[in-house]
Amino acid sequence: MPGIEEFVRPHPIDIPSMPRKQRKRVLWGLVAVVLVLFIGGMGVAFAQRHHPICTDKQPPIAQRMVDIGQMVYQCQDGEVVTVGG
């Protein structure tokens, strides 16, 4: 029966380090992706800023969260609108 010594490496695996130039390129790539996603999210929020929740185009009088990412709004005319999810 094999012992535990055969499954446990006595020395850690030697992982070659990434060259500095390649590391900087990867980090700048990550920064670029994060910035593009952030600016894209701001653009979507800006484009949707005039999208009314209620059909009467008035702000809702009450809101509550019913599930993760799902909100229920009560409009001034009595309409109940569920958004999200």
Image: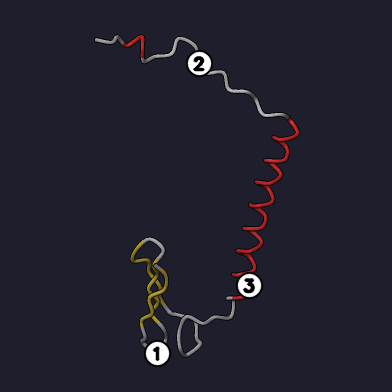
Residue count near mark 1 (Cα–Cα under 10 Å), binned few <14, some 14–19, many ≥20: few
- Say which element carries label 3: helix
| Farthest-out residue, right | 21
Q: Picture coordinates of residue 33 (x, y %)? A: 65, 52
Residue 12 disc label: 2
Which image quarter holds the N terminus?
top left
Q: Does 85 sit above or below residue 47?
A: above
Q: Picture coordinates of residue 54 (x, y %)? A: 45, 84
Q: Picture coordinates of residue 10 (x, y %)? A: 45, 9
**Label 3 belongs to which residue?**
46
Which image quarter holds the C terminus?
bottom left
Q: Answer with mark 2 or mark 1, whichever residue precedes in sequence.
A: 2
Residue count near mark 2 (Cα–Cα under 10 Å), binned few <14, some 14–19, many ≥20: few
Q: CA distance from mark 3 to mark 1?
A: 27 Å
Q: Quadrant of residue 2?
A: top left
Q: Mark 1 is on which residue type?
A: Asp
| Residue under the image location 62 percent in, 23 percent down | 16
Residue count near mark 3 (Cα–Cα under 10 Å), binned few <14, some 14–19, many ≥20: few
| Residue under the image location 69 percent in, 35 percent down | 23
Q: CA distance from mark 2 to mark 1?
A: 68 Å
> Is residue 30 left or right of 78 when viewed as pictured?
right
Residue 77 disc label: 1
Q: Mark 2 is on which residue type?
A: Pro
